[in-house]
Image (cartoon, coloured by chain):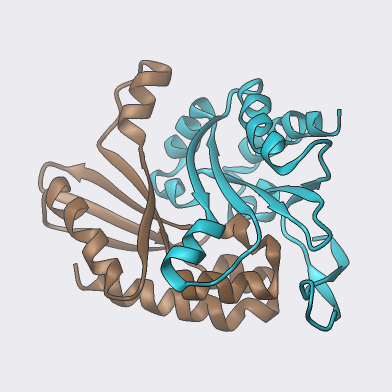
Chain colours: A brown, B cyan
């Protein structure tokens, strides 16, 4: 398995974690701009029951513009997806895309900004 | 990854041509920016993708940073059937979802559509995802190739 994400496994309820992620991200300048409720989408589109699972799209506008000034197509990696899902009744998993592996590996000129994003996401979510 | 020579600087500044790596698959649609924005979701839908998220970068940059930015939107597209398969392979695959489609204005005012190429992502390095991402790439490509018509 390719290591493409950071992962935290928390002894906490899904709803509590979901509520805390945006405020943690905000401390590092990230705004939650989009939200996909995978459970609701699976139910609505496929009639399938899926675990509680949300994908939050988060963006730090200062770092986003820095990346876009280097490469206008860097938007294909934005926003950064942070996943929150229910592993079991008492365990919630949080994962965030590893931008050093995506953005940083894709374009050497974006390594610095990718490392900055990675460091900030890691710092924000480690506080959970 | 395609190498292209692109003018980075905008109008009014000294133009500087740089060697730049372009991400994703690219189309030059017929029609205006607004027409393209309206058309992309229809074309995606024909291949089973719903547009689940939308970010207006111009408005975000203005609101959050007070900066003028070109017209630029990021649409998050998802084909629920394929998403379900990907999550079945690995629950963490959600960090690579949804598939982004960019609609933006180039320096000369022309409209550009750029979609993530799933075969350029990290998922391509994992053999378990390969058949899936190859099919998703084909579907995205088929959908958005309709922009040229």
Q: Is residue B9 above or below residue B132?
A: below
Name which residue lies at 64% across and 51% down.
B124
**Residue A61: x and y, percent?**
47, 69
In percent of the image, x 68 and y 26: which residue is there? B43
Question: Which residue ends up furthest to the top in the rendered image?
Answer: A47
Task: Depth check: give the residue in front, B13 or A105.
Answer: B13
Q: Position of residue B29 (x, y in %)?
A: 81, 39
Residue A8 found in image quarter: bottom left
Q: Name the one closer to the observer, A30 or A114.
A: A30
Task: Determine whether, in the image, residue B89 is placed left or right of residue B46.
Answer: left
Q: Which quadrant, please, contains the N terminus of chain B?
A: bottom right
Q: Is residue A60 visible?
A: no
Q: Is residue B71 left or right of residue B52?
A: right
Q: Count the marks: how many?
A: 0
Q: Residue at x 31, y 28 (%)?
A: A40
Is B117 left, or right, of B29 in this rendering?
A: left
Q: Position of residue A15 (x, y in %)?
A: 15, 46
| Residue occupying image coordinates x 26% and y 53% | A93
In the image, residue A50 above or below residue A85: above
Q: Can the viewer see residue B73 in this picture?
A: yes
Of residues B103 and B143, the one nearer the viewer is: B103
Residue A104 horizontal/vertical position (percent) = 60, 73
Quadrant of image for the C terminus of chain B: top right
Q: Quadrant of residue A86?
A: top left
């Amino acid at each position: 398995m390719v290591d493409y994400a950071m992962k935290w496994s928390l002894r906490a309820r899904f709803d509590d974690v979901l509520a805390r992620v945006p405020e943690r991200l905000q401390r590092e300048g990230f705004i939650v701009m989009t939200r996909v409720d995978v459970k609701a989408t699976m139910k609505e589109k496929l009639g399938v029951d899926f675990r509680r699972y949300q994908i939050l799209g988060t963006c730090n506008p200062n770092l986003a513009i820095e990346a876009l000034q280097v490469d206008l197509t860097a938007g294909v990696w934005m926003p950064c997806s942070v996943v929150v899902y229910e592993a079991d009744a008492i365990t919630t998993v949080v994962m965030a895309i590893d931008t050093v592996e995506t953005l940083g590996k894709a374009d050497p000129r974006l390594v610095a900004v990718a490392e900055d994003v990675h460091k900030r996401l890691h710092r924000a979510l480690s506080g959970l | 990854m395609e190498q292209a020579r692109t003018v980075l600087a905008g109008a009014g500044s000294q133009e500087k041509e740089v060697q730049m790596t372009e991400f994703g698959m690219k189309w030059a649609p017929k029609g205006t920016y607004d027409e393209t924005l309206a058309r992309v979701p229809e074309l995606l839908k024909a291949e089973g993708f719903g547009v689940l998220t939308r970010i207006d970068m111009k408005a975000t940059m203005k609101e959050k940073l007070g900066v003028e930015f070109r017209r630029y939107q990021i649409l998050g597209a998802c084909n629920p059937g394929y998403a379900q398969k990907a999550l079945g392979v690995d629950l963490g695959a959600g960090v690579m979802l949804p598939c982004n489609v960019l609609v933006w204005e180039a320096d000369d005012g022309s409209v550009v559509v750029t979609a993530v190429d799933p075969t350029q992502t990290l998922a391509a390095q994992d053999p378990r995802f390969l058949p899936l991402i190859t099919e998703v790439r084909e579907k995205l490509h088929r959908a958005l190739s309709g922009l040229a018509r």
